[in-house]
Amino acid sequence: MTSAQSLTDFDAEMQHRLTDGPTPTPVHPRPQPPARWRQAKVIVTRACWAGCEFCHFSRFVPLALDKTVPPVLGIADAAAELQRAPAFDMVKIVTGLSFQTPLEYFTHLISTLRQATGRPVQAFSAVEVDHLARRLACSGRDILTEWKLHGLDRLGPGGADLLVPTVRPSLARYRISVERWLKIHRVAHTLGLRTAAGLMLDARTPAPDIIEHLNHLRELAEGLDYLELQPLEPDHTALAPVRPPQLDQLLRVAVAAKQLLPNLPLHIHRRHIRSADAEVLLADAGVDRVIETVVEVEP
Ligand code: SF4
């Protein structure tokens, strides 16, 4: 059997488990409960022009240059607020896409929060790197080199909603391609940066798409720090009639992720866990860490 054939067979087995296989059941001996990972979330701006169908985070701001753009986060105020916050393990910086904020602002924000907190900084994602590179007519490598020099530890999972070229245009027509997303992560890894990936799913996400997504992540596995399960949060999005995944589906996906990427820690945010029992089952299925946001700072 060729390696291509064995991969296809493996994918077929995965697909069966994701759709028709038995529901994952508790394992014995029970693994350690998922560790808690406390994050301080820093939001630069919720203004964004991209209008991704699934986005519950941003507020649409059109591209027209004569429109007033809402203010971005004050850096000194954000640093002071994080210094007063309960203890946390990392700083996570996110933003909508802006045509106005200069690169120097983002660099200064990373460097200031790194120094003020002494905690690792996970900032932005391949989406923002690509957007800035186009705006400034430079390369993603230039931007990542600058940010690494000023304290960036890890690039966040944004843009890894579903790494399936045929479905991306219907979810987020202006988002970077799968190839571009993978390339920016590879560049980050060559610079010594770590990166993270997500997997967004809803009740109708087909098993072959999940497998294709996970297989793309296998190409990067050495440089990834974690994979975050991101159940769709449809309220206030263009996908409002679509349901988020049920626990049963999440368990199957966690098992599949652990089989395809056994060494990659699997995360989920606490807001997606409905009960203590669900947390136990997710741990059994392979979830390693539960993320908690202990403070959120925004303009
Ligand atoms: S680019 Fe990011 S912030 Fe903007 S709409 Fe898409 S998901 Fe939301």
Image (tube, rainbow, N blue to C red):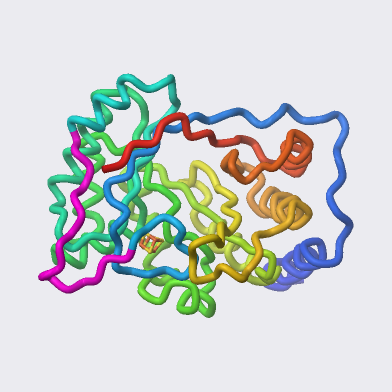
Residue 211 in sight in this render: no
Q: Position of residue 67 (x, y in %)?
A: 15, 68
Quarter holding the C terminus is: top left
Q: Nearer the viewer, residue 120 or 112?
A: 112
Task: Name above or below for residue 132 compared with residue 52.
Answer: above
Q: Position of residue 261 (x, y in %)?
A: 63, 50
- Look at the magenta stretch and give its main secondary structure: loop
Name which residue lies at 62% across and 28% down: 35
* Residue 182 is a magenta residue: no
Q: Position of residue 219 (x, y in %)?
A: 52, 58
Would you say 55 lies left or right of 215 here? left
Chain part drawn in magenta: 60-75
Would you say 298 lies left or right of 27 here? left
* Residue 67 is a magenta residue: yes
Q: Position of residue 269 (x, y in %)?
A: 57, 42
Ligand 1 falls in which quarter?
bottom left
Name which residue lies at 69% across and 65% down: 203
Residue 177 in sight in this render: yes
Would you say 260 lies left or right of 145 here? right
Name which residue lies at 56% across and 57% down: 233
Quarter holding the N terminus is: bottom right
